[in-house]
Image: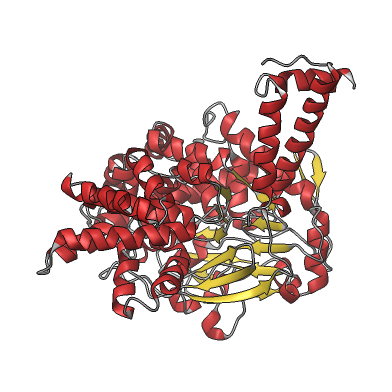
Amino acid sequence: MGMVNEHYLRLLSKDFPNIKKASAEIINLMAILSLPKGTEYFFSDIHGEHEAFIHMMKSASGVVKNKIDELFGQSLSSEERGRLASLVYHSENEIKRCKSEDINMDDWYRVSINHLIEVCKSVSTKYTRSKVRKRLPKDYDYVIDELLHADESVNKEHYYKEIINSIIECQVAEEFIIQLSNTISRLAMDRLHILGDIYDRGPHPDYIMDYLLEFHDVDFQWGNHDILWMGAAAGNWPCICNALRVNIRYNNLDMMEVGYGINLRSLALFALKAYGDDECARFIPKSLDENIFVPTDRALEAKMHKAISIIQFKIEGQRTKAHPEYEMDDRLLLDKIDYENGTITIDGQTYELRDKNFPTVDPKDPYKLTEEEETLMHMLEASFLESEKLQKHIRFLYSNGAIYKATNGNLLYHGCIPMTPEGDFEEWTINGVTNKGKALLDYLDAEARKAYFNGNGAGEKGDAGDILWYLWLGSKSPLFGKDKMTTFERYFIEDKATHKEKSVPYYKLVENKEICEKILVEFGLPPESAHILNGHVPVKLKDGESPIKGGGLLFMIDGGMSKAYQDKTGIAGYTFISNSRYMALAEHHPYNKEQQEGTSPEIKIVEYFKTRMTVADTDIGEDLKQQVEELKLLVSAYQKGIIKEKI
């Protein structure tokens, strides 16, 4: 036995000081390895749609309703099963509804608790009793544990009934039902993977992040909208401008001012002064959701929208010039404007501008901020840096996230792998370092972390974290996947041909099975059994597009959870589900806010496993097997007297 091994075993012996303790843990781990693999859920492109997302989480994308139908299909009517499902999804509302009816609430509590316990038993069968106990609410963990494991013999029948009667007599039945319902949802989902874009468009990514902070096992594959907010939280000025512009455009003032405490008063005052007589007609915000806490003045919002957009174009021009390696000179457009005639010339073609009022732009130096704009940016930067909740959420994205993840035979990423039209991995040189494929993503992941944790604030000109800005919109960014972001053209030029953002070759290449196999091999996964899960690009199901690519090796799971995309996709998002028996796509219908429910998703099984997967077949299983081998070595060391037991 080498010195390193003996040293490690002596450390291990502190937790398992004798043969009995070590053997008991070996028995425990071997039993866990034989359990069915827990169910993994994969979401993508949530875009702030907190109500729809949390409904999907609580319903386990329709799996909870399926469990209810299996358990009570013969004993409860369809309506009763639907109400039981609603009780799990939206407990408080269902309790309130029942109270409004002329029924005996004590009887209802008693029946509901019994039904919920049966559902809870069903969704907990894959776990050890210890693991289930860890996911129980602290105030009721003992009671729920007893109800879950009380047998139905005569000896325990009275005991079981007395627990429920006591819950009702103590007047905690409503709280108990709410906590029990939440437990069902937590147990139905073992692991959660978010394939990017929690932020922007929808009203409350902050609510989503609060919810996920409490989830037991979640990881993130950053999307370009997430990286934008990561850059803004690092104090990067281009990211701050883009984050503000996008969310003012979608009227998300509640989230910014109340949720994250970002003070927009300075921007409002500046916009009123600079654009007071300008109707800013091209900048009137969209209204997919109404603010509750922050009154909406559309005329003022339009001015704020235009003000931050012009500042964005100026700052982006400065950063483009500072980073020639980004190859973004085609985004230098303010110096292409004929301010006297109100036209712009791009690639030899002259276009009339839809908005010709640029009171803050100096035609001789169009990318220079005015003194007032510079002061405003410092104030906005401070607001982002000092937002305690935003910084907490962004640190959570960093600690639980990455640009990609390989787990349980699946390769997860948001956007794309940069590739040439010929199907080779595309090289990119940044900071004097050239990479491609997996090495490029690893390098960019490390740089993204440096930008936040080692950025020393935002820099004198808000330039720390420019790599995060590039990952938001750069042509070689694996999170963006287009040749350019045509924000200026969409605002100022009528000709829609100038609005087009051309997708990179990757999105056509992955229709080919061999390309998907090549990507899997690059990331160290076996192409004969592994899969790719990809978000970012909405699948236009209503136009006949399929989310399944590359001969079944790749699944594109952006189905348009954002209301802004649902008219294009025809659905309201996908959930990808991987359990011990199969992999499936849950195809969601639009969430009904008034009823606070969604119709059950259509679950389509895309692949059955040849044999039922156990914990032993997972990445966690490999870790547990290693622990078993180490414990066996420890037992051997005890038996040989190399390490002394403590009895």
Tell me the quadrant of the picture where the C terminus can be found.
top right
Q: In this view, does 621 lie to the left or right of 573?
A: right
Q: Residue 427: image x %, image y %?
A: 81, 52
Q: Quadrant of residue 17?
A: top right
Using the image as rendered, state which of residue 75 and residue 55 is in the foreground. Answer: 75
Is any part of residue 253 visible from this angle?
Answer: no
| Total numbered labels placed on residues in the image | 0
Q: Residue 129: image x %, image y %?
A: 51, 45
Q: In this view, does 535 lie to the left or right of 150?
A: right
Using the image as rendered, state which of residue 375 and residue 572 is in the foreground. Answer: 572
Q: Which residue is depicted at the point 74% across and 70% down?
A: 610
Q: Which residue is depicted at the point 45% across and 52% down?
A: 186
In the depicted structure, whether residue 302 falls above or below residue 454: below
Q: In this view, does 252 lie to the left or right of 338?
A: left
Q: Residue 70: image x %, image y %?
A: 45, 73
Q: Residue 185: image x %, image y %?
A: 42, 56
Using the image as rendered, state which of residue 644 and residue 455 is in the foreground. Answer: 644
Using the image as rendered, state which of residue 46 and residue 643 is in the foreground. Answer: 643
Q: Which residue is depicted at the point 57% across and 71% down?
A: 585
Tell me the quadrant of the picture where the N terminus can be found.
top right
In the depicted structure, whether residue 328 falls above or below residue 77: above
State how the image is colored: secondary structure
* Residue closest to the far right: 1
* Residue closest to the far left: 102
Q: Which residue is depicted at the point 23% across and 56% down?
A: 296
Is any part of residue 371 visible from this angle?
Answer: yes
